[in-house]
Amino acid sequence: MLKNIVSQSWRRGACALQEGNHAGALHACWRQFHSGQMLRSSRSFFGVEDFMDEDNSRPYTYKKEKRSKNPHKHISFKQRTIAYMEPFTLDVFISKRFVSASLTHRTTCRQVAVAGTNSKDIKAALQSRSDIPACLAVGRFLAERAKEADVYTCTYTPRERDKFEGKIRAVVQSLIDNGINVKVYLD
């Protein structure tokens, strides 16, 4: 922001100097720098502040951090760094009608690879969309798509209502058999 202020005031002073007005050049620099309009930063209504990047061409925004309800709560080193050490997580959803699985990047929340029995390429090759062979096919397709995205390791933590057996285990085992290293966390 200071770079922006100085460059604008310098340009106005240089223009006044080219016109032959030496006192006007100094006054233009001083007036622009101390007018007060450039020194105030614009704030948005919703708590998002706008700033300019290094070359002052594009504004970018950032959102302020939310404060914790308990400011004295201790967060361990593992809790702070686990998302960066093991960035990809596996999510498996099994219903009565279909099976779907996805690999998600924890820090950016982007899905890297997705496979499900509702997709056309898997649907045509299966007799049923929710049995064990369907789960094995979903794991195989997910492993292929993950390798295309250069993901070779992930973690899986089952939901509270899910048990690590049957169809969920078939999806995870199919991923392991097809070359994806899956670290399973069971509580």
Image: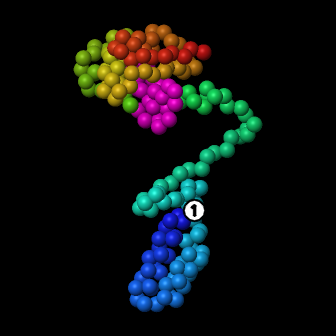
Instruction: Name the residue located 49 percent from the left edge and 32 percent from the top edge.
Output: 106
Decide which of 154, 15 is in the foreground and name it. Answer: 15
Residue name at image x 49 percent, y 67 percent:
4
- Residue 15 position, x and y percent, is 42, 82
Residue 90 in view here:
yes
Few, some or many residues within 10 Å of mark 1 (<14, 14–19, 20+): few
Quarter where residue 69 is shown: top right
Quarter of the image where the C terminus is located: top right
Q: Residue furthest right?
A: 72
Q: Is residue 64 above or below residue 157?
A: below
Residue carrying label 1? 43
Q: Is residue 76 left or right of residue 110?
A: right
- Residue 6, percent across and down? 51, 71
Q: Residue 178's quadrant in the figure?
A: top left
Side of 71 relative to 168 (left or right)? right
Quarter residue 143 falls in: top left
Q: Magenta residues?
A: 84-111
Number of numbered tags placed on the structure image: 1
Classify mark 1: helix, strand or loop. loop
Q: Is residue 107 magenta?
A: yes
Question: In this view of the protein, which residue sits in the foreground, 163 or 74?
Answer: 74
Point 54% across, 66% down: residue: 2
Residue at figure coordinates x 55%, y 71% from the top left: 38
Does any portion of residue 114 appear in the rendered image? no
43 falls in the magenta region = no
The residue lying toward the viewer, choosing from 109 and 21, is 21
* Nearer the observer, 120 or 88: 88
The image shows residue 148, relative to residue 21, as above or below, that is above
Residue 67 at x, y percent in the picture: 67, 44
- The three-letter amino acid code for the residue at tag 1 is Arg
Residue 139, position in %: x, y?
Answer: 36, 17
Q: How is the image coloured?
A: rainbow
